[in-house]
Image: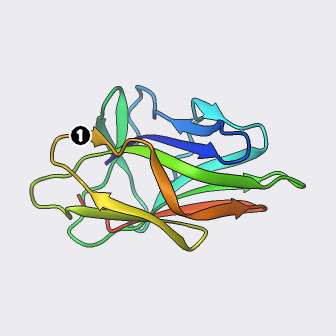
Amino acid sequence: MLLFFVLTGTNIYSQIYQQNFGTTAINTHPYNGAPAILDPNLSGSSWTNTTNTWTSGGGASGQALWLTTSGATTISLTFSVANNYEASISSFNFWRQRSNSASQNWSMAINGIAVGSGTIPTTGAATGTTNVSAPITGSGYLRFLYLPLHL
């Protein structure tokens, strides 16, 4: 389950994206709800997963994207990056929670480059500001992959 996602850039050190998923139940896939913060040079924020379905439930505040599956699932967040602009990602933060029987770990890649990994607690918690393990600069699009998240 994901609720809150924050990206920060390296050159200007500003937050370029934050999604809190609002208070309305989520039942469409992909999830394209407007983020709370979106850099003007990014567009097309879209959340998808390999099961092609979302459910929602309570998160840290408001709704959260939930998955109910018995196998490994990849969650993707994709943006389009404006022409003549490169997004540099230096850190991220997201809220996560799992059921007692779900995977205990997550890993994340940005545009195919591994940038971090950690655990998924049974009581919801944010990762806290997590520096990427490899510098990420992207133009054209950015794609964030989380594996395995099966709840």
Q: Nearer the viewer, residue 138 or 72?
A: 138
Based on the displayed image, in which of its 4 quarters is residue 136 positioned?
bottom right
As displayed, is residue 109 above or below residue 16?
Answer: below
Based on the displayed image, in which of its 4 quarters is residue 8 positioned?
top right
Q: Dot 1 corresponds to which residue?
A: 124
Q: How is the image coloured?
A: rainbow
Residue at 90% x, 55% y is 84
Q: Nearer the viewer, residue 45 or 86?
A: 86
Residue 119, horizontal then vertical, whole percent? 25, 57
Residue 57, horizontal then vertical, whole percent? 28, 37
Q: Can I make out residue 64 in this image?
A: yes
Going by the picture, which residue comes out furthest to the right? Answer: 84
- The local secondary structure at tag 1 comes to loop
Residue 143, horizontal then vertical, whole percent? 60, 62
Query: Where's the C terminus, which quadrant?
Result: bottom left
State the count of labels: 1
Q: Nearer the viewer, residue 80 or 48?
A: 80
Residue 135, horizontal then vertical, whole percent? 62, 63
Q: Can I make out residue 28 in this image?
A: no
Amino acid type, label 1: Gly
Q: In the visual, does 24 lie left or right of 32?
A: left
Q: In the visual, does 79 lie left or right of 110?
A: right
Residue at 79% x, 55% y is 86
